[in-house]
Image (cartoon, rainbow, N blue to C red):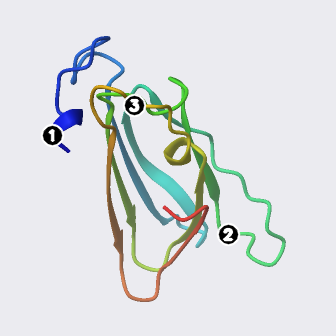
Amino acid sequence: MAPYLAPPRAMYVGAPGKHGYLNLGFELDASGKSILRELDRRAPLIVQQELYFDEELPGMPCVYILSSGGPNIDGDRYTQNITVGKGAMVFVSTGAATKLAEMKDNYSGLSQVIYVEEGDTLSSFPSL
């Protein structure tokens, strides 16, 4: 890793748009439908509004994580926290973590913490 630990020649690590975070919290509403209850984010990470498209699981939302900054590049640091509350279910998908640019000076990092209680469902594609 030593050759890739030099400061990036472009924007520094931690500059606006280089350190994105995302906190998602899902829980059941009064009718038993899973909803996105908590959303806290910092650019460049974005989450689309929940979609309910599965006829077999009409109470399961699908959310798609996007990155407004394009591919991950030198010095990007992203953190994603996903919490699925008791009895809730969600389908999370992303292309944001799979787009990588050539890195010459530094590295890009993504940390994910996923909390799923017993009996909950979290599906993802591609794998988170």
Q: In this figure, which residue is indicated by the disc labeled 3?
A: 103
Q: In this figure, which residue is indicated by the disc labeled 2?
A: 59
Nearer to the camera, 106 or 111:
106
- Of helix, strand and loop, which one carries label 1? helix
Q: Are marks 2 and 3 in contact (CB under 8 Å)?
A: no
Q: Of the residues shown, which amino acid type is indicated by label 3?
A: Met
Work out which quarter of the rendered image holds the N terminus and state it. Answer: top left
- Of helix, strand and loop, which one carries label 2? loop
Q: Are marks 1 and 2 in contact (CB under 8 Å)?
A: no
Mark 2 Cα-neighbour bin, 10 Å: few <14, some 14–19, many ≥20: many
- Among the 4 quarters of the image, the one containing residue 59: bottom right
- Of helix, strand and loop, which one carries label 3? loop
Q: Nearer the viewer, mark 3 or mark 1?
A: 1
Q: Residue at x 36, y 20 (%)?
A: 17
Q: In this figure, which residue is indicated by the disc labeled 1?
A: 2
- Give whichever of discs 3 and 1 has the lower sequence position: 1
Q: Of the residues shown, which amino acid type is indicated by label 1?
A: Ala
Q: Position of residue 116 (x, y in %)?
A: 38, 75
Give how far apart the Cα atoms at labels 2 and 3 are: 41 Å
Q: Are marks 3 and 1 in contact (CB under 8 Å)?
A: no
Mark 3 Cα-neighbour bin, 10 Å: few <14, some 14–19, many ≥20: some
Give how far apart the Cα atoms at labels 1 and 2 are: 48 Å
Nearer to the camera, 1 or 10:
1
Nearer to the camera, 101 or 30:
101
Q: Residue at x 48, y 61 (%)?
A: 128
Relative to residue 115, is residue 73 drawn left or right?
Answer: right
Q: Residue at x 25, y 16 (%)?
A: 15
